[in-house]
Every structure is written in C-alpha cells, then in structure tokens.
Amino acid sequence: MGDDEERQPPGVYTLVTEEGEKKTSIGFTGKATANYANGDIYEGLFENGIRQGAGVYTYLKGDVFTGTFENNLKTGLGRITYKKGGYFHGHFKDGKRNGEGTLLYANGDIYSGEWKDGKKHGPGTYVFNKTKYEYKGTWKDGQIVTGTWTLTDGTQYRGGFQSQKPCGDSTWTTRQGTIVEGSYVQQVVPVDSAPPAKPGETPAVVTRCFWSTAALVS
C-alpha cells in the first residue's frame, strides 16, 4: 500500500499479543497491538483490558499520538504529529490538552503556553507564520482576552481583545516610542458581498474595529 493510500477500517477488533491474536482485550495485561474496528491502531501497554502506560496511537487518518495513557485516555507529557502538518507537544489530562504545551499548525503558526480542557487557557504566545505578528497575553476558552499585539516593525498594541481583535481601552506604542492612548469599539456588520441568507439561516457578518484617540504622548 502506498503512502498516499488511506487505510480502510477492518470493521472488527483484534488484539495481537505475544501469545497470539485475540478478539477482545478484556482482562488482558501486558504489551500488545490493538487493531480497532474503525481503523485506529494502538501499540503499547494494557492493564486489565484498558490502555494503561506508554503507547503509540495511530488514527485512521494518519495522526499519531506518542505518550502515556491512563484509563484509556491520554495523560501526562505526550506528542501528536498531524498528517496534514504540524504537531502538539505538551501535557494532557483526561484525554485533552491540559497544562503547558506547544502547538505548531500546518500553516506554520505556533502557539506556546497554557491549555485547559483542550483549549488555550492562561498565559500564552501566538506567532503568525506569514506576518510574524505576535499575540502575547492571557487566553480564555481558546481566545486571547488581554495582552499585547506586536507587529514586525516593533509597533505594539496593549489592551483587551474580543473575538481575536482589539477591544476596549488600550494603547499603541510606535517603534520610536510614541504612545497613543484610546479605545476600540467593535461592531458586527453584514457582509455586503455575501448572498442573502435563506429563511432560518444566520446572515453572513463581519466584526469591524473602530479606533478613537484619547491622548498622544510623545
């Protein structure tokens, strides 16, 4: 089978152990390879029939997790390598990203910081690959809520964020040191180029930010 060909789900579960092949993992303790009916594959340790300890879990679509399991769930320090590009290296709890970790996206963007229940949560830094712009601050439920936005020329925004965009009282500091104080107001407006929404559908909208200068400090 070529690398570009996708594996097909076998439709049945098999557990390959040193003693031979089994149809179930119930009661099994030791090292084995589990071939799941959905096409996923686990190679590692079992305890009383569940994934427990070090192992490698390969998903049908090609993503691969290497790390530790507890009660069938990812736990502790581990790494997921994504078939489409990128990786996550960090900590897990109850099967989700939790604690410190770094996510490299397929497009080259990178986030390094804290996670909770699978989402960015706590202090962290996000760097955009194409522009090299940097978000650095406090995140909640996957989105930055307060911190800095630094451009490649050194110009920096400091303040709040909403929906990944500046919001509220804030300051801009230029590379020459000039400080501009003011505030952003967000408005959700319809997308003029979008076709009319069908009955029951939500119209296409975009969030726009409007800046109001309060003071200029040289």
Image (spheres, rainbow, N blue to C red):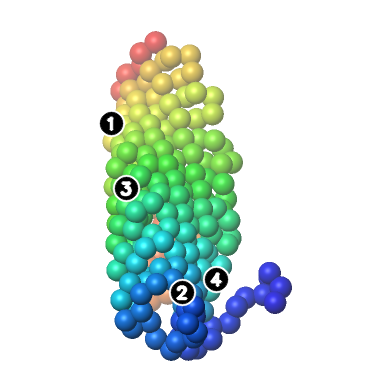
Residue 36 location (% of width, % of height): 46, 80
Measured Cα–Cα span from mark 4 to mark 1: 45 Å
User: In this orientation, which residue lies closer to the viewer: 156 or 215?
Assistant: 156
Q: Secondary structure at mark 2?
A: strand
Of tags 2 and 1, the one toward the viewer is 2
* Mark before the other along the chain sequence, 1 or 3: 3
Residue 99 marker = 3
Residue 56 location (% of width, % of height): 48, 64
Mark 3 Cα-neighbour bin, 10 Å: few <14, some 14–19, many ≥20: many
User: In this orientation, which residue lies closer to the viewer: 175 or 52?
Assistant: 52
Measured Cα–Cα span from mark 2 to mark 1: 58 Å
Residue 82 location (% of width, % of height): 54, 59
Whether residue 213 is visible here, answered yes or no, is no
Note whether 199 is above or below 82 in the view shown: below
Mark 2 Cα-neighbour bin, 10 Å: few <14, some 14–19, many ≥20: many
Q: Name the residue rendered at 31%, 64% in the picture.
A: 70
Q: Name the residue rendered at 33%, 83% in the picture.
A: 26
Q: Secondary structure at mark 1?
A: strand
User: In this orientation, which residue lies closer to the viewer: 63 or 42?
Assistant: 42
Amino acid at circle 1: Asp
* Mark before the other along the chain sequence, 2 or 1: 2
Image position of 191 (left or right of 115): right
* Mark before the other along the chain sequence, 2 or 4: 2
**Residue position for label 4:** 61
Note whether 12 is above or below 153 in the view shown: below
Q: Quadrant of the C terminus?
A: top left
**Residue position for label 1:** 169
Q: Name the residue rendered at 31%, 76% in the picture.
A: 48
Of tags 3 and 2, the one toward the viewer is 2
Q: Secondary structure at mark 4?
A: loop
**Residue position for label 2:** 32
